[in-house]
Amino acid sequence: MEEEIDLREYIKVLIKRKGLIITIFLISVIVAGIINYMVLLPIYNSSVTFRIAKTNGVPLLGKSDVENKIKSDYVLQEVIDKLKLNLKTAELSDFIKIDSVADSGYVMLSTEYTSPEKTRDIALSVVNHFIEINQPYFQKKIKLLEEEKQSVEKQIALEKEKFDEVEKLRLDIIKSEDFSLTEKQIQINLLLNYYTQIRESYHQLINKYYILENQILNSNDFEIINYPSISQVPVKPNKKLNLAISGVLGLFLGVFIAFFAEFWQGGKH
């Protein structure tokens, strides 16, 4: 019975102070609406996916290296200067998020900004500048592989010439009348040993050539896979959610103040 009386008292307080509760609720919603629609700027999102250069199937840079280089002051300042952004490098860095897709070497970079066009431009400019400063490193590695492959090709050609020389000497020994049969056999055996050495060297060079060729074939340059687009719908602020939260908080605050006011006035009596 005592609990029923307490519950009725609570309901009476709510009914008695309903004006106060509704007023605080409306003030909370109105203030939240003003902040959402008139104060907070809309934030747009744009993303770009690109591939990290690979040599022999291995990405040139790891995720941490990519993030450090993308968010370096040099790259960010280049973007700020190019797009004439009124930002510092640390501020622009906060607008950039980087995700790598497992260990495949693919990276998704997303940006947020107050203008849909600028958001797209920031994402594309950051990636382009990142590629621009790292591409020479990839090209240098590929050039070294190509040069080594050409060197091996020349060595293979020399070994082939040695094969021809050995075969010519063998035929000359067989046709020669200056050597006895025993001497011819000794000379041919010496040539055979030399031929075996050449053949081993030749096969080693051939294997090395194919390894280098595979390393080059399994190498890929930097490449943008999905270009960023202009988003027409802002991702922030979530106005409906903010209004709902403000309404709920305003309602709780109104109820709290209603009971506090009732307690205060009851204490005075």
Image (cartoon, helix red, strand yellow):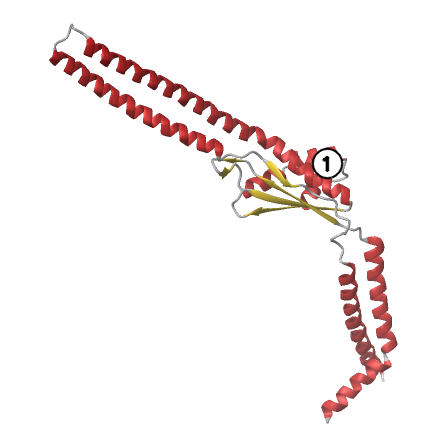
Q: Is residue 99 above or below residue 30?
A: above
Give me the residue at 65% from left, 35% from top: 128
Give me the residue at 31% from left, 15% from top: 164
Q: Quadrant of residue 82?
A: top right
Residue closest to the far bottom: 1
Name the one closer to the observer, 187 or 80.
187
Give me the residue at 19% from left, 16% from top: 188
For mark 1, does the 10 Å Cα neighbourhood hold few (<14), some (14 to 19), or many (20 or more) residues? some
Which quadrant holds the C terminus? bottom right
Q: Quadrant of residue 184?
A: top left
Q: Which residue is mark 1?
A: 80
Instruction: State how many labels appear.
Output: 1
Name the one closer to the observer, 27 or 169.
169
Q: Is residue 151 above or below residue 80?
A: above
Judging from the image, what secondary structure is the residue with disc 1 in? Answer: helix
**Residue 267 appears in the figure:** no
